[in-house]
Every structure is written in C-alpha cells, then in structure tokens.
Image (tube, rainbow, N blue to C red):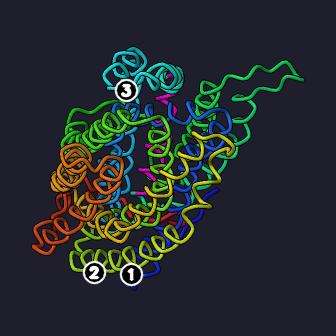
Amino acid sequence: MTDAEPTSSITRGGLARPLFTLAWPIVVTQLLQVAYNLADTLWLGRYSTAAVGALSLAFPIIFLLLSVGGGFTVAGSTLVAQYTGAGGERSAGKAAGQTLSFVTILAVGLGALGFVLTGPLLSLLPADPVTAETVVPLAADYMRVFFLGTPFLFGFFVFSALMRGYGNTRTPMRVMAVSVALNVALDPVLIFGVPALGVPGLGVEGAALATLIARAVATVIGLYVLFGLGAGPQVELEHLRPDPESVRKIVDIGAPSALEQSTSALAMLTLTGMVVTFSPPVVAAYGLGNRLISLVFLPAMGLGRATNTMVGQNLGAGNTERAERAVHLAAGVGAGVMLLVAVVAVAFAEPIVSVFMATGTEAAAETIRHGIDYLRVRAVEFAFIGVLQVVLGAYRGAGNTRTALGFSLLSLWIGRVATVYVLAFLLGWGVFGVWVGMAAGNVLGAVAAGAWFTRGTWKRSVVDEGEEIDPDDDRSVTTGGG
C-alpha cells in the first residue's frame, strides 16, 4: 500500500514532475471524497426530491461544525512538510502525533455538540412551509446519524493531511478507494433495504449510516498505515501525549485555518438560508449543482494541496525561489485545466445534471432545468478557482494561514454572500441572481489573492533553522510515492 521515492524530487530538480506526482493522487482522493456525496445524491434522488433537498440543508450545517476541527489538520500538514524539508524526521513525527491527538479530542466534542444542536440549527433556516414540512425533518435524521461518526471522519482527514505534508499522497488515495467502494455498496442496501432478506430501508438515515461505516473502516486502515507500516512521519505512541508547546504551535497555525473553514461553512449556511426561501426544486437544484461543482473543483484543489506541500518542504529547506516558481507553474496549469473543464460543463450541462434525477415528475423537470442554468453560470468562474486554490495553498504551506483566511473571507462574504443578497433580493433577479452571485466570489478572490502574492511577503518558514532538529537524525527523507 506504500511507495517510496527521494524527497529531492520535491526540493531539488525539475518542478513539473514532483508537482504532478503530488497532485494527481490528491485529485483522485478528492474525486473519491466527492463520490461519497454523489453516491448519496444519486440514490436519494431516486428515493425522493425531498431527500435530495435534505442533503442541501444538512451539509452546510455539518460543515460548519466539522470545519472547526478540520482547519487544524492544515497545521499538521504544514509542520510535517516544513520539518521534513528541513531534515527533521523525528520532529515531523512528533508534530504528526500531536496533531492526531489534538484533533481527535476536538472531534469527539464537536460530534456531540452537533448531535445535540441539530434541531436548533435547522430551526434557524427560514424555510418555506413545504420545505419545512417535507425536507427539514429528513435533514435532521441524516445529521444526527452523521454526527455519531465524527471521530471516524476526522481520523481519515488527519491521516491524509499528515501523509500529504510528508509527501505521500498515494497511500491516502488507496485507503479512500477502499472506503468509497464500501460506501457505494452499502448505500442502496441501507437506503432502500432488501425486503427479501428482511433488511428494512432507512432512507436518508441509511445514507448517513453507510457513510459512517465506510469512514470508520478508512480510519482504522489509516492508523495501521501510520503506526504499523512506517510509510509517513515517524509517529510513536509517546507523541500522542499532549505537549503544551506543540499544541500552542498547532493552534497558532491552525486557528486561522479553522476560522477560515468555519466561516466558509457559515457563509454557505447563510447562502442556504437565502436559497430555502425559494421552492423545493430550486433548493434541490442548488444542492445538486454544488455537488457537481465540487467534482469539477478537484483539479484546482489537487494543485492547491500539492502546492501546500511543495512550498512547505522547500521553505523548510531554504529554497524560497524554488517555492515561488512552483506556485507560478501550478497557477498556470490550474487555470488552463479548469478552463477546459468549464467548456465541458457548459457543453454537456443537460446530460450531466439529468443523470442524477429521476424523471417523469414536474418537480424533477424543474429541478433539472434550474440545475442546468446553475452549472452553466458557475462555469464562468472555473479558471479563477484554479488560480485561487493554488495561491491559498502557497500561503498555507508557508504557514501564513492568516493571509489565506483574509482572502477566503473576501471571496465568500463580499464576493458571494453579499452579491447573492444584492442581486437576488435587492435587485429582484431571483434565482438567476443566486447563480450569478455564487460565481462572483472566486473571481474576486483570485484577483485579490494573486495581486497580494506578488508582494513576496509570504516567504517565511514557521520552522526556525535548527529548531527541534536532531542533528543525528540522518534518515533519508522519503515521499512515499507522493
């Protein structure tokens, strides 16, 4: 399940090969991640339109709570990358262990909080009467089951982030593939049941339970790889004991990322609150469109996370100019690839959207029509997504998470939330104003973040030269195939 190649491909030599080698497994891993949601959407779309709408309501709230802990995985990835680039294997292992224990404790608390607050949070959404009666109760059922699996969800996220910082992106991809295959197999069984075998259909709760089981399997495999196979940073059991100084550094780097992700989730929740004032087909189209866009978003995300590792390891090794050249290369490739994706999305919007909805009803036809419009409008921003994700990845890899936070807030709250409100409600554009406003955020964010990047103030490692680096630790640093 592991591979190895010299980390010199990240810190020395050509840039294109290590960037691509890091990025493509991340893209595949995120594609598999999206497969969780798409599998749920595919089967629940055949279950009922209300079930698809329930996912539209549930995910922003789920992400709001989970993002608080998820942001701290960025700190682990950054520290592991910079210590690895500086040659500090044992320091990288300690940073990984501290991140794992800290985020696990946080995940247990957040899962319990989410379970208790499901009802009150859903009640804050200004849903129309039909949505409140048919969609909101299903969203609550889904969320309560989902929050029970929060530690398992975080377990894989931490494992993946730590391995990515080390330079190993293929192993998390393989673990994710096993988990997704299990989820896809369980979804129809748990959603619809198997009457011949006496297995009851659980509907939206079945979709959540399938995800919970699949995530648990991924976490167990990930921990075995991390502790048993030595394919990543050298984590030992003693590294799991909380160390105040290490936790302080994790919090210092991770808190802005946690705030970034949680405010991103809050922005999406605010947008969902606006969308649910429209009819159920619009709500369903919004949720379906967002899941499809999360799929085409993958190349940009892969390059952004690969840039995180490239910048982190090269700054740790003192190669600041190489780090900057990697960012320019990744941004150019990201913009080009995403432009091609946009062309495909516009040309084939109708068959892409239609495959996820059962036909034959007026509500389904209206959902498909709105979904096609949404996908085509959002395609305008795709090339800008490529640039923005790479530049934000560079800031995070440098440990400059506060800058990444600032531009994320600009993109989401000014470029998206405020724009949607003005266009859809103040100017009376209605649903089309929602679609246009959603597309505006990444355009604004990419232009602003790219301009700020040229100032060069991000070129500073968060790992001081010689800090906690054991001079006798001459173990050859590896990427694990990343």
**Residue at image location 49% in from the left, 69% down from the top:** 346
Residue holding disc 1: 15
Residue holding disc 3: 127
Question: How far apart, in angstroms, are the residues tagged by discs 3 and 1?
Answer: 50 Å
Q: Is residue 23 left or right of residue 187?
A: left
Q: Nearer the viewer, mark 3 or mark 1?
A: 3
Q: Please state the horizontal and vertical placement of residue 37, each as a whole percent of the image.
A: 55, 43
Q: Earlier in the sequence, mark 3 or mark 1?
A: 1
The answer to whether residue 98 of the structure is visible from this angle is no
The secondary structure making up most of the magenta span is: helix
Q: Tell me which corner region of the image, top left, top right, bottom left or bottom right, holds residue 279.
A: top left
Q: Please state the horizontal and vertical placement of residue 374, each as a whole percent of the image.
A: 43, 55
Q: Is residue 377 left or right of residue 361?
A: left
Magenta region? 148-164
Task: Assess whether mark 1 and mark 3 are in contact (beta carbons under 8 angstroms).
Answer: no
Q: Amino acid at mark 2?
A: Arg
Q: Please state the horizontal and vertical placement of residue 436, each as a whole percent of the image.
A: 31, 57
Q: What secondary structure is marked by label 2?
A: helix
Q: Is residue 332 left or right of residue 22?
A: left
Q: What secondary structure is marked by label 3?
A: loop
Q: Earlier in the sequence, mark 2 or mark 3?
A: 3
Depth order, front residue of 400/197 = 197
Q: Is residue 5 above or below residue 439?
A: below
Task: Assess whether mark 2 and mark 1 are in contact (beta carbons under 8 angstroms).
Answer: yes
Residue holding disc 2: 325
Q: Earlier in the sequence, mark 1 or mark 2?
A: 1
Q: Which mark is residue 383?
A: none
**Residue at image location 55% in from the left, 50% down from the top:** 368
